[in-house]
Image: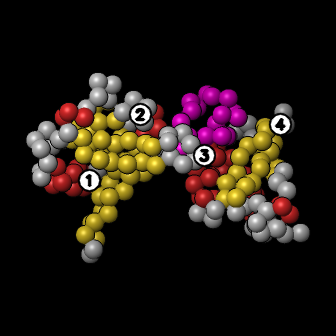
Amino acid sequence: MITITESAQTHFQKLLASQEEGTGIRVFVVNPGTPHAECGVSYCPQDAVEKDDIKFEFEAFNAYVDEESSPYLEEAEIDFQTDDMGGQLTLRAPNAKARKVADDAPAVDRIRYLIESEINPQLASHGGQVSLAELTEEGIAVLQFGGGCQGCGMADVTLKDGIEKTLLEKIPEVTGVKDITEHQLGENPYY
């Protein structure tokens, strides 16, 4: 479920050395399965371990994940990279905003998962997002842009060169995409 690289394990071991013996780490997701999901890591003393926690044993410490966060931390990775300024701890959790679906799940569920886990995080850096309005019988994914993407002059490029390419590559049932957004009503309308 969670991968903690050797460099991150060494980093945690150093941090935990100044804590009460038996203290581990807790990895969690706040607001899991929503666009506002945030991942975090904290100290986890023995008296804070819950009976439903999932325990991961490492050489120098234990990591705990609460039951609610567990499915959203599938394929998560914690890494620590050193640099001239000290170091950077990163937690990558591709399923935090959307619970992973099975490969044989209905196409609509797989499209929504792909949008939430891969496409919207990229659009969020520009203040935008996209959602699936419907999947037609012909395999056309009908999409609705929002936020900074609604009214953006680059929406067509994003749709064809980014979103459509990704959906066609990863969801065999998709034959194309269609944008139904009223772009003239957006923050940056174009005509």
Residue 132 colored magenta? no
Q: Amino acid at mark 4?
A: Thr
Q: Which residue is mark 3?
A: 116
Q: Which residues are magenta?
A: 97-113
Could you tell me if the residues under marks 2 and 3 are in contact, i.e. CB atoms within 8 Å?
no
Task: Please identify, in this view, whether the residue under mark 4 or under mark 3 is nearer the observer.
Answer: 3
In the rendered image, residue 7, in percent from the top left (x then y), is placed at 24, 55
Up-down relation of residue 187 to residue 164 (above or below): below
Q: Which residue is mark 4?
A: 136
Residue 100 colored magenta? yes
- On residue 70, the disc is 2
**Is the N terminus in the top left, top right, bottom left or bottom right quadrant?**
top left
- On residue 8, the disc is 1
Q: Amino acid at mark 3?
A: Glu
Task: Please identify, in this view, whether the residue under mark 2 or under mark 4 is nearer the observer.
Answer: 2
| Extreme-right residue of the structure | 191
Q: Earlier in the sequence, mark 1 or mark 3?
A: 1
Q: Earlier in the sequence, mark 4 or mark 1?
A: 1
Could you tell me if the residues under marks 1 and 3 are in contact, i.e. CB atoms within 8 Å?
no
Give the Cα separation between the discs numbered 2 and 4.
33 Å
Could you tell me if the residues under marks 2 and 4 are in contact, i.e. CB atoms within 8 Å?
no
Q: Quadrant of residue 33?
A: top right
Q: Amino acid at mark 1?
A: Ala
